[in-house]
Amino acid sequence: MNTARTNLEQNITPHAAARYWRATLARDSRADGTFVLAVRSTHIYCRPSCPARRPLRRNVIFFRTREEAEQHGYRPCRRCRPNEISGQVALVQRAAHHLAESSEEGSNLRDLATTLGTTQATLRRAFLRVTGLKPRELAAALRLKRFKALMRSGKNITDSLYETGYGSSSRVYERSNAQLGMTPATYRKGGQGMKLGYTIATSPLGKVLVAATERGVSAVYLGDAEHALIAELRKEYPRAEIAPATHSFQRWVKEIMLRIEGQRPHFELPLDLQATAFQRRVWMELQRIPRGRTRTYAQVARSVGQPKAVRAVARACATNPVSVVVPCHRVIREDGALAGYRWGLSRKEQLLAQERAAS
């Protein structure tokens, strides 16, 4: 491979480049949307499934997106039109449009696949690859998003419930707690609109800050100094209204303290978090790891349907704001090493030891 091509493909590993080339030779339409190939001799970029004659490998440069190809002076192929949305991304967009418009609480995957002219298996794979979610999970998230939009527009709760297909307000809150970060509260970037009360307790791991809204727990921080924990909370929610707790959530604090000691959960804690779709999926998967057990980052990535997203899983663990409740300390490296932990490796080691002993 020449130097020019090596420099352009610096963000693509040799293993990925080899996989892309195999998909190109096979004209694999499943790879459409995951990368584009650019031909140096023609200055044209194509989809992997392009019906045109295959170029020589030495003339091919791979880019992850069409925008990258165009930034380097390549123009879209007129046969496969790689600058137009298609493949799995287009399928998911069409499905999301149908789901967003639906007012039925239950999503029927078979009917949706039939409407879109595809199979249930193909639709499920496309959703996991593009969004990291299953169709029914995205349907629930979209319905809740629509409910919040109606409430923000000034509609009363009864009309909003009716238009989005919820049978009662309790159904909204059930969905909220089951899907991390998808509460009916109105959030903007930085926690605008949130009213957070916090309390600080002492544990075997040092100081524990627990912050919550009326809906549920929003932060569980571990550290040595109270002022540092409060500063961290304000940094994470810079536009929220933060003050020492005036309403009591001592029951939640006691439950968290028991979990810090490695004890079995007594009840499910309500959570009120802001999160991306991928973070929600990872955090939900972490809550499924049995107490006293561990999983690797790669195992978690496979469990959420994105086996290559190991680094993204690690980032989701690192940005988890509710330590212990979402047990990111149970995720370790492939070689068994504990790896990083937002609150310090010694605390991660102690948490795991206490859980194993209590189990």
Image (spheres, helix red, strand yellow):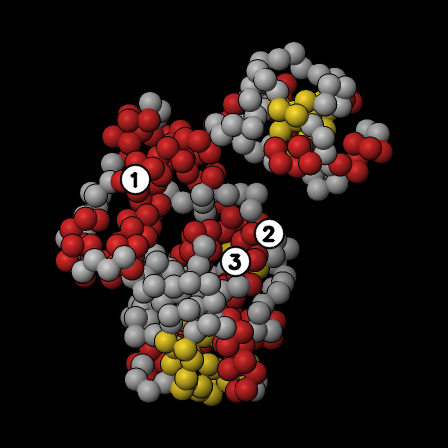
Q: Is residue 252 visible?
A: yes
Q: Amino acid at mark 1?
A: Leu
Quarter residue 131 falls in: top left
Mark 3: few/some/many CA within 10 Å (<14, 14-19, 20+): many
**Residue nearer the viewer, 21 or 151:** 151
The residue shown at (50%, 73%) is 238
Indicate the position of residue 54 as horizontal and vertical percent values: 67, 15
| Label whose residue precedes the other's in the sequence (3 or 2) | 2
| Label whose residue precedes the other's in the sequence (3 or 1) | 1
Mark 2: few/some/many CA within 10 Å (<14, 14-19, 20+): few
The label nearer to you, 3 versus 1, is 1
Q: Amino acid at mark 3?
A: Ala
The label nearer to you, 2 versus 1, is 1
Q: Is residue 292 visible?
A: no
Indicate the position of residue 59 as horizontal and vertical percent values: 76, 22
Quickly name the residue at label 1: 99
Q: Is residue 67 above or below residue 217?
A: above
Q: Amino acid at mark 2?
A: Arg
The quadrant of the image that shows the C terminus is: bottom left
The residue shown at (44%, 40%) is 128
Instruction: Determine the secondary structure under disc 3.
Output: helix
Indicate the position of residue 160 as horizontal and vertical percent values: 20, 54
Q: 133 left or right of 307?
A: left
Which mark identifies residue 316?
3
Quickly name the residue at label 2: 311
Q: 234 left or right of 39?
A: left
The residue shown at (34%, 74%) is 213
**Residue nearer the viewer, 252 or 175:** 175
**Residue nearer the viewer, 251 or 299:** 251
Q: CA distance from mark 2 to mark 1?
A: 30 Å
Q: CA distance from mark 3 to mark 1?
A: 26 Å
